Image: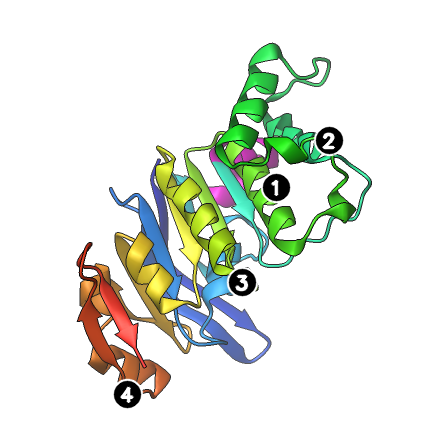
Amino acid sequence: MQLEATDLSVTFGKRSVVKAIRFSLRHYRFVGIIGPNGSGKSTLLKTFYKVIRPTSGVVTLDGHDVRKISQKRCSQLLAVLPQQQTMEAELTVEEVVQMGRYPHMTFFAGSTAADRTLVQTTLADMKLDHLAGCRLPTLSGGERQMVLIARAIVQDTSCILLDEPTNHLDIFHQVTILDSLTALNRQVVVVFHDLNLAGKYCDYLYLMHKGEIAARGTPSEVLTRSHIKDIYNLDVDIISHPQSGHPVVVL
């Protein structure tokens, strides 16, 4: 699937939040959007899944304007995990994950055997099967986030968009989530704050600053001393990971 944004701008009142951005997934599998707080990362992502209407420019899926695609069809193409999502309903883990199949169900038909198999497989892959019968409010924050990502995975879309999915999680849950996403045969777009996680998992990065794309390219091309000095106003060292070779930011 091809997700693209052309000359995309978003203005709130007199404040320009996103400025004439061009974005494309191309052939990349795991794309990261990084940048300081207030740089426009989340706003950009929200234009991709129609929560925010751009002031100008267009977002397309396989050449079709997303604003002209029905919500159900859009949900069959894009799975989304927003930055903040509350769900306090007394649903079990299995019931929440099963919700990911809704865009593929017809009005009269419920879940199929294939749907239930996909849910069970995903729960097992993400090591959540032992929690299948637990109620969501009884889970830890990390466990809930894993459940919501499992729901996005069973949506079985070509592309998954996630806004800071590892925020506030311990290192075990961060790695488990990102390893699970990496193992998928799908395109993934993630908003990151952690530059080292972005450098480890992404094959392409967009670095945003003041609503614009300040740099784009591979992690080695984007995570440089000069870029981090210019954008974050920090003096850092960049070293290569001894095993994978990906860039590591050292404070």
Q: Circles 2 and 4: CB distance less than 8 Å? A: no
- Secondary structure under the numbered disc 1 in the rendered image: helix
How many angstroms separate mark 3 from mark 1 (CA)?
15 Å
226 displayed left or right of 153 = left
Q: From the image, tell me which residue sits under label 2.
A: 133
Q: Earlier in the sequence, mark 4 or mark 3?
A: 3
User: What is the secondary structure assignment of the residue under circle 2?
Assistant: loop
Find residue 98 and report its horizontal and vertical position in percent: 65, 28
| Residue type, mark 4 in image | Asp
Pick whichever, 172 or 80, lies toward us: 172
- Which SS type dominates the magenta stretch? helix
Sequence-wise first label, 1 or 4: 1
Query: Which residue is located at x 33 percent, y 87 percent?
Result: 234
CA–CA distance between discs 3 and 2?
Answer: 26 Å
**Residue 210 x %, y %:** 41, 78
Magenta-highlighted residues: 65-77
Q: Closer to the camera, 34 or 198?
A: 198
Q: Is residue 197 above or below residue 112?
A: below
Left or right relative to 185: residue 44: right
Using the rendered image of the protein, determine whether residue 155 is visible from the camera's viewpoint.
Answer: no
**Where is 61 relative to 125, above or below?**
below
Residue occupied by mark 3: 167
Task: Of the two numbered discs 3 and 1 on the same chain, state the one appearing first in sequence.
Answer: 1
Residue at the image position 77 percent from the left and 47 percent from the top: 137
Labels 3, 2: front one = 2
The answer to whether residue 22 is seen in the rendering is yes
Identify the secondary structure beneath mark 4: loop
